[in-house]
Amino acid sequence: MARSAFGPIALAFATTQLVWGQSPSLSVSASPSSGPTSTFTMVVTDANGFDANSTAQMLISWDGGGLDACYVIYNIQANALYLMDDTGSTLLGGVAPGSTPSSPVKNGQCTINVAQTTAVVSGARLL
C-alpha cells in the first residue's frame, strides 16, 4: 500500500550541469489536502539558464534516501518525467508532463498524476 500519492506537480528541485560554485534558487510549496493526495509546486531559477542536459529532481523520502521513496526526475531536453522504482535501480515512466500514459507512473510509495503535471522552462526558470 502506498504511503503517499502525487497530484499535479510543477517540478523543480535541483539541477545538474550547473556552473561550479553556483547554485539555483528554489521555492517549494505544498497544498494541504485530505487523504493520500498532495499537490507540490516547485520553481527553480538558474541565472545561467538550463543547458540541454539539465534535469530537475524531487525527493520525498522517509529517511532522506532514494530507496522506497518518491524520487521524481524531469529531463528538460527530453521533456520526460521519470519515477525511480522502490529499489533505486530503474527509472519508470519516461513520459511527457501533461500526457496520458498507457499505464500509471507509480512505485510502491507514490503515483504521479502525469496528465496534471506541468514542467515549463521560461528563460532561467523551470516552473
Image (cartoon, rainbow, N blue to C red):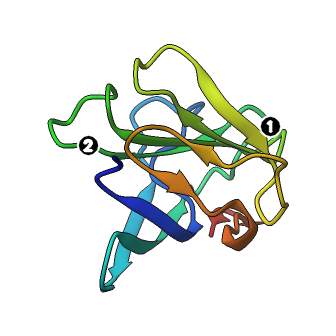
Return the residue at label 1: 52
The answer to whether residue 122 shows anywhere in this view is: no
The residue closer to the viewer here, 43 or 102, is 102
Which residue is located at x 37 percent, y 44 percent?
A: 109
Image position, residue 84 (x, y; %):
51, 30
Name the spot of residue 55 as percent of width and height, x first.
63, 39
Q: Disc 1 on helix, strand or loop?
A: loop
* Amino acid under disc 2: Ser
In 3D space, how far apart are the residues under numbered discs 2 and 1 (Cα atoms)?
28 Å
Residue at 32% over, 31% down: 68
| Kind of residue sitting beneath label 1 | Ala
Name the residue at the top extreme.
Answer: 89
Which residue of the protein is positioned furthest toward the front in this rendering? 1
Residue 70's place in the image compared with 96, above or below, is above
Tags 2 and 1 touching, CB below 8 Å:
no
Q: Which residue is mark 2?
A: 61
Q: Residue at x 49, y 38 (%)?
A: 107
Q: Assign a secondary structure to mark 2.
A: loop
- Determine whether 19 is above or below 13 in the image: above
